[in-house]
């Protein structure tokens, strides 16, 4: 079955995350060869989590930092893989097409399509967080997964669904980049990542 869907190279940058102790599970993705990003709520309370890649290989990830307000966490892994390509230029327009990759309801490596419905900014504990409002279907298991534009560039991190139909939200890539710059400087392929 995997042979039938292996054509999408982005799957090699995406992982499945499970916290066996606290019960959290979701999606993550490589932002460098040994760094994985996911939602904080997926790994909340955990120091070590179980990870499985598209090839079915199992390994662990260590939570090295997180931002609870932005709902982002950074994991260090010892399994090398290709990072996602970051969105670098232009504008993210309302109405533009986007795709989410994740593991909704245990259906591993599913791609869901939709559009950007709006650009939002919410305050949480005094900190403003930028979100893309999307109508892409998001279900349990999608949390922490990548959101791509039509050019297969990362534009957000899928994070939550609001009450209502097709009211889904992804943390904007700007806030992800800000988070990475605050906690870890790595050779990440984006002109916006600070190199030290």
Image (spheres, rainbow, N blue to C red):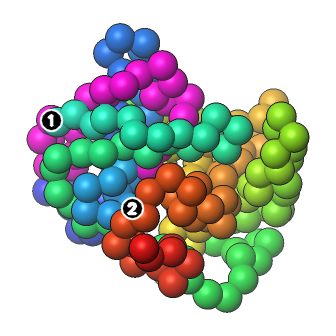
Tell me where the magenta segment starts and ends, as one range: 37-58
Residue 69 is left or right of residue 105, and the answer is right
Q: Is residue 175 visible?
A: yes
Residue 174: x and y in percent read: 65, 66
Give the secondary structure at mark 1.
strand
Mark toward the viewer: 1 or 2: 2
| Residue that protrudes farthest toward the top in the picture | 21
Residue shown at the point (33%, 63%) measured from the top left: 32
Q: Is residue 146 visible?
A: no
> Which residue was labeled with disc 2?
31
Q: Residue at x 56, y 78 (%)?
A: 192
Q: Residues within 10 Å of mark 1 (few under 14, many from 20)?
A: few
Q: Find out whether residue 128 is within the magenta segment.
A: no
State the separation of the CA atoms marked 1 and 2: 19 Å
| Residue underneath mark 1 | 58
Q: Residue 106, percent across and down? A: 38, 30
**Quarter-wise, where is residue 18 in the image?**
top left
């Amino acid at each position: 079955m995997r042979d039938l869907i292996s054509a999408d190279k982005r799957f090699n940058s995406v992982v499945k995350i499970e916290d066996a102790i606290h019960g959290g599970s979701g999606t993550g993705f490589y932002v460098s060869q040994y760094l994985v990003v996911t939602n904080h709520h997926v790994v909340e309370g955990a120091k070590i989590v179980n990870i499985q890649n598209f090839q079915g290989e199992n390994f662990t990830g260590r939570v090295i930092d997180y931002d609870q307000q932005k709902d982002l966490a950074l994991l260090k892994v010892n399994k090398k893989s290709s990072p996602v390509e970051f969105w670098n230029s232009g504008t993210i327009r309302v109405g533009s097409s986007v795709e989410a990759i994740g593991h909704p309801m245990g259906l591993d490596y599913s791609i869901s399509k939709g559009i950007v419905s709006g650009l939002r900014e919410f305050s949480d504990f005094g900190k403003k967080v930028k979100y893309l409002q999307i109508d892409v279907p998001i279900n349990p298991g999608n949390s922490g997964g990548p959101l791509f534009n039509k050019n297969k560039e990362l534009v957000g991190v899928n994070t939550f669904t609001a009450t209502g139909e097709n009211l889904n939200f992804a943390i904007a890539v700007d806030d992800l980049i800000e988070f990475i710059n605050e906690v870890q400087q790595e050779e990440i392929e984006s002109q916006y990542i600070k190199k030290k």
